[in-house]
Amino acid sequence: MATPNATDNCMSSVIVTNNIVNFPITSDTTITWTYTDAAKNTTTQTQEVVIDDATAPAPMGGRLTDIGGLLADHLPDCPHCPR
């Protein structure tokens, strides 16, 4: 996340801080940015962060091997168990 910046009419540097203490942000939240100049003048700005995870998870590693036949030899004797 890029930090916003600000300018000051006295050509001094502006310190930028925010209220977020836990990164990464994992739910909708409002960030309050505070800009403070050398004379301790401050102004604030808010930024809405909306988390919209619309992408389904994707399996890694390709197709899984069918292991049904491999397990048949290791199943206990059970009249209701498919073979």
Image: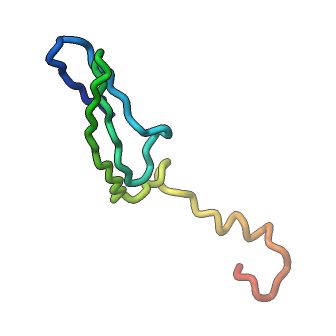
Residue occupying the far bottom of the picture: 80
Figure quadrant of residue 37: top left
Image position, residue 70 (x, y; %): 70, 63
Task: Report whether 5 appears left or right of 78.
Answer: left
Classify the position of the C terminus by image quarter: bottom right
State whether residue 80 is above or below residue 32.
below
State whether residue 79 is above or below residue 75.
below
Query: Closest to the observer: 78 or 27?
Result: 27
Number of callouts: 0
Query: Closest to the observer: 39 or 6?
Result: 39
Task: Report whether 42 appears left or right of 10.
Answer: right
Residue visible at 75% across and 82% down in the picture: 81
Residue visible at 58% across and 63% down in the picture: 66
Residue occupying the far top of the picture: 11
Figure quadrant of residue 8: top left
Classify the position of the N terminus by image quarter: top left
Task: Report whether 35 appears left or right of 77.
Answer: left
Image position, residue 48 (x, y; %): 29, 49
Task: Report whether 30 appears left or right of 60.
Answer: left
Query: Closest to the observer: 40 or 76?
Result: 40
Image position, residue 2 (x, y; %): 30, 30
